[in-house]
Image: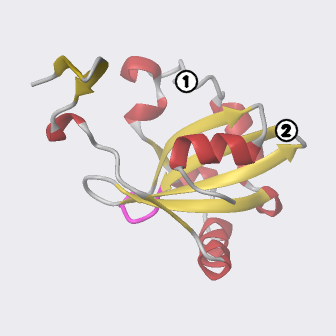
Amino acid sequence: MLGFYFLDNVFIIHYPIYLMNYQENFPLSKDDLIKIKNILKNKKFEDFQIHKHYWLKGVEGIPRHGFDLEELKKLFNKRELITHGFKRKFTHSFGYTLIYKISTNVFLKICYFLDESPIKIFNAIPIKRNLEKSVSRRYGLRI
């Protein structure tokens, strides 16, 4: 049960383990990144199913993070823009988050479920700030 309490004059929020679905992120090596780029190279955008999490409140047509599906489709074949990647364990499979560098301070994080059939796109999150700061804050990693 979600709990709130004070400990030594500090406000603490207690999240039960069943509410925490967050696992540790592991940076992908250059070899793993090349393997994933090759997997994507052999696929068409239409081969991917869009996960229900991509849509706001599960309503198709409204992207959760504001990145339109048509823009995602245009960016999908630009594998040369992929600079980094992370792997995270989800409930049923691994999520592979790839970071596309669109311009100096504009990036896009796309999470793929490549282990599932059909393969899925989980989300697409635009980042409009310093990538190192964003990744450090979100994942606790230095790139």
Can residue 73 be seen from the camera position used here?
Answer: no
In terms of image quadrants, where is residue 24? bottom left
- What's the CA distance linking mark 2 and mark 1? 22 Å
Earlier in the chain: of badge 2 and badge 1, it is: 1
The one nearer the camera, 75 or 92, is 92
Q: Residue at x 54, y 41 (%)?
A: 138
Identify the residue shown where x is 51% and y is 24%: 64
Name the residue tied to disc 2: 105
Secondary element under disc 2, as helix, strand or loop, is: loop
Range of magenta residues: 113-118
Give the class, few, some or many, for how many residues have Cα within 10 Å of label 2's Cα (few <14, many ≥20).
few
Magenta-colored stretch includes residue 116: yes
Crowding around mark 1 (Cα neighbors within 10 Å: few <14, some 14 to 19, many 20+) is many
Residue 55 lies in magenta, yes or no? no
* Residue extending farthest left: 1
| 113 and 77: which is toward the camera | 113
Give the quadrant of residue 73.
top right
Q: Given this view, does label 2 or label 1 mark the residue nearer the observer?
A: 2
In the rendered view, would you say 35 is above or below 107? below
Residue 105 locus on image (x, y percent) = 85, 38
Horizontal and vertical percent position of residue 19:
21, 34
| Residue occupied by mark 1 | 63
- Could you tell me the amino acid type at mark 1? Pro
Quarter location, residue 127: top right
Q: For residue 104, which numbered disc appears in the image?
A: none
- Image quarter where the N terminus lies is top left
